[in-house]
Amino acid sequence: MHCDVYKFPKHSEMYVYIARPDYPNDTNKIRDWLGVLPKDLRQGLGEGKFLMHLDLMETKKLARVDKQEVIEKLMSQGYFIQAPPSNVLLAQAEARMKDSQDKRYD
């Protein structure tokens, strides 16, 4: 199972894996690989930046997610979202809240 991994500058440490089931035979076509994402999700993520291509069968393990879970999601829905760890999500939420409060009193 081949996939491409994208990151999103607006969401630090969030990665989206996109299935590439016909790789390498699909590389001649210009495609919108992120088009498999639900429209609302894609709009919320902002502009994606290609990070790397993976052959999951050759990859022994992934850093923060279970490889088998990634493969199952890629096969069933065409994408997998690797959310940031909970401590990063908490720090991001606190920063947004502080920023919102600071703007309120400016």
Image: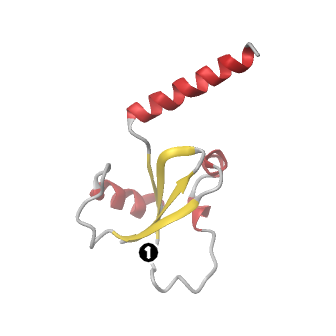
Residue at 52% x, 55% y is 7
Residue 73 sits in quarter: bottom left
- Residue at the far front in the pictured view: 106
- Residue at the far left in the pictured view: 60
Identify whether 86 is placed above or below 12. above
Q: Residues within 10 Å of mark 1 (few under 14, many from 20)?
A: some
Rendered-image quadrant of the N terminus = bottom left
Q: Position of residue 49 (x, y in %)?
A: 57, 61
- From the viewer's perspective, tell me whether residue 45 is left or right of residue 105: left
Residue at 74% x, 13% y is 105
- From the viewer's perspective, tell me whether residue 42 is left or right of residue 82: right
Q: Nearer the viewer, residue 81 or 21?
A: 81
- Residue at the far top in the pictured view: 105
Residue at 63% x, 69% y is 32
Identify whether 74 is placed above or below 86. below
Q: Which residue is mark 1?
A: 21
Rendered-image quadrant of the C terminus = top right
Q: Position of residue 86 (x, y in %)?
A: 39, 33
Q: Nearer the viewer, residue 9 or 66?
A: 9
Residue at 43% x, 35% y is 88
- From the viewer's perspective, tell me whether residue 36 is left or right of residue 75: right
Q: Position of residue 96 (x, y in %)?
A: 60, 27
Instruction: Identify the secondary structure beneath mark 1.
Output: loop
